[in-house]
Amino acid sequence: MVIRIRQLLVTILLLGGLSFRNGYGDVPVLNVDGQPLAANVARLIECRQAMGAPFPEDLLIELKAAVQDQESMHIQELLDSEVLLAVHLNPEYRTKVTRGPAKALLTQNGYQLFLVKVVNESTLTERLRVSSPQAGNVYSGVSALILQRQQQEHLGDSDPQQLSPNRSSDSSSKRIFQFELFSDPPLTDRLSGLGVEYFLLLAYCSEDGKREATLAFDVGQGTQDLGFRGEIPILFEIRPALPVRLSIFDEDGTRTTARLTIRDSKGRVLPPQPKRLAPDFFFQEQIYRHDGEMVSLAPGEYTIQSSRGPEYVVQEQKITVDPHTENSVEIHLQRWVNPMEFGFYSGDHHIHGAGCAHYQDPTQGVSPVDMFRQVKGEGLNVGCVLTWGPCFDFQRRYFSPQADLISEPHTKLKYDLEISGFGSAALGHVCLLNLSDQVYPGTNGTTDGWPTWTVPVMRWAKEQGGVTGYPHSDMRIDEARYADWLVERHDENGDEEVSIDESEEILLPEKFGLMDEDATGTLSRSEIARAADQAANGLPNLVLPSMNGSGAMEIFVSASEGVCDFTSAMDTGRIGELNTWYHLLNCGFPIKLSGETDFPCMSSRRVGQGRVYVKIADEKRQEFEFADWCAGLAAGRSYVSDGYAHALKFEVGGKEPGTGKLNLKRPSVLLVEGLVSFAPDTPVAVAHGTQPNSDGRREIGDTRVLHGERSDQYIHGGERRVEVIRNGRVVASQVVPADGKPHRITLSINVFQSSWVALRQFPQLHTNPVEVIVSEEPIRSSEESAEWCLQSVELLWASRNHLIDESERDDAREAYDRAIETYRTRGRDAKRIREALVVP
């Protein structure tokens, strides 16, 4: 009865409009229709209960009754005691914020819900926005393009004008808070147009103690109050988080490092990614922790997902952080495969400690200590951190002729170079490994003065015992440009088409008759482009690469000059990567294949998403040397993989890859033997071939962009087709289950001429080849491959010779001419061998 009388008095006072006479300081009240407000509060009750933060029981009983009765004033009277902030939007759309009676209590590293009341006299239905100078990302200087490729734009620089968000001389602007209006169903962050409604504010703080934050609200540009009444300072009291000690054991019981993804009971990742600085990377959901380290968590329930790279099983365990006891958790990692037992040691030859997704402030990238944590936490044996254009002057200080001192017997970290962002990058980026000197003569340790084409710098690296190769090797195709190239070169009568007579000496992507869609006896640019688009999804194919700046462009010249050891796979489109490699192998160039990630540029998910497994011994060693691993990479004693597929043994006629040539006196039938194993659970992604994409088969394997929805799901089991590749063509295959067990491959193939033979499972796995020499003839298996390489050299020179410095252009022209003559000669050799070939 007393409550009813009080409600009546308040209603009488409100007949004139807005009032603050509710007993709760500056929280305004407004008489509105009860039904929509009751619906708003009912959703609020439901949401808070679902999030484990219900209203106090006595309040909840009264509140549910008021909602049932749709009593607008009584609902406000009850709820306003829980309000932290009240936002008033006047008829001119200006916002004013006042403090409510709720206590501003938080727990460090935990999320807390607060109630925000909105009195909307404007009837706007825009999105309500909250901001704070003490909130936002704690880093800056991140590549927006990389985040867009990986569908993580929300993690970009929150204030591009503020380059030091965490080092301000004014400690009051340090970004330790995170605020957002909860908008998951059934709630929203948009105003309904009702005069009164309530919102939930989600707050987080990474520090403990008393900390002040200024919160501001608006509904769009120009709605902030001119007198700063749309913002208000609040002093929060933050209780300290609790330390949780981690005990991390490898499968053999040794203490190690693990990849951990921690989520609270509502699925939120902790620590929040925008609040991360090294050793944690903001663009990853996971963190990496060594055995014995701590994580700080607020009291509550959590799920910890643990692993140590693709060779390990992903496990989950639930923990409760109790404020009344010491908290600890044991993590026992489990492998499904161990390539080291077969003598294979994994590595990612291309990762970065600066640039792309890395921030440039508060530091210019991250340190070897931070990168080692990533490498070891992903179960890699080798991580090659390559200094390149971004932050070059800062990062170069980490170089050493030997593996970094932080290295361990089974985990090596070495800083070397990628020539990218300077020097010869316009002709193809170059990875230089195992360097003893990172200063090119005449450069004084800077990025100035480097050669502007790749051959000289690769020769310099080889002279000091380095290993050289090209990264992200898919050169991609440009169908229209390819069509223009063919027409401009071969249209002799000037009709802007290619006739059947004009095509006699042309390397076409398909047979002329299949390309001539309208049966006119000529090929238009559009017909050529469509045929190229279709043919480029095959492997191998004869579509010339675009030569527009992507991939391993100058490899055709450096291979001919003998200064290139490898090309790379596992981070760009698999067909483009393998197509170039296959054609070079068909010409007899012993280029090897290596696996890489180009972390965090091509992919920011984790190091070792693409990797190479180098065989150093026949069984696991107590320790290995980085130089020995590099030598094995250059020799091709290896296979490349995404880590979820393995060729633990591969022999052709008893010969393993990288151990010399198999010499035959005559054509023979050879036994191909292998031992393969595929993970029982494989991530769902175009990169692994487990997710459909609309961009065509040639994009399978690409990590540069996702080509589909970002997913954390896994696909269980299935089958994998393992293929024997001879001179780029499938000649035998066997299907095995993806069950985490080793399976033997036993197949027979005919070898009629000198050939290369490899094992492949597309797109996850490829071995390096065994070279089989028949009757002492060199490998010259394809006239078309030689012509394709020759035309690629000509196209590259025509497209990009102007990017070579004039002082170097004559030397480059000579090398290009030598390469053209080499491919012409090898094409003639291939024709001679083919014509003399007798196939039973």
Image (spheres, helix red, strand yellow):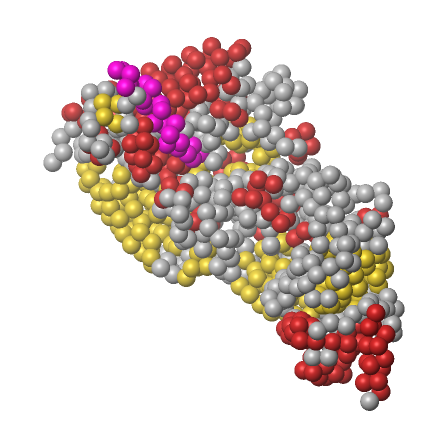
* Identity of the residue drawn at 62% across and 37% down: 355
What residue range appears in magenta? 473-495
Q: Position of residue 174 (x, y in %)?
A: 79, 49
Q: Where the N terminus falls, by quadrant?
A: bottom right
* Identity of the residue drawn at 49% across and 44% down: 705
* Identity of the residue drawn at 79% across and 72% down: 80
Q: Position of residue 243 (x, y in %)?
A: 73, 63
Q: Nearer the viewer, residue 741 or 164?
A: 164
Q: Where the C terminus falls, by quadrant?
A: top left
Residue farthest along the bottom direction in this orientation: 1
Left or right of 297 on screen, residue 208: right
Residue 577's image quarter? top left
* Identity of the residue drawn at 53% across and 23% down: 424
Q: Can residue 367 be spotted in the picture?
A: no
Q: Position of residue 718 (x, y in %)?
A: 35, 59
Residue farthest along the left direction in this orientation: 840
Is residue 529 depicted above or below 826 in this figure? below
Residue 146's image quarter? top right
Is residue 151 depicted above or below 447 in this figure? below
Q: Can residue 4 be spotted in the picture?
A: yes
Count of numbered labels shown in the rendering: 0
Q: Position of residue 82 (x, y in %)?
A: 79, 72
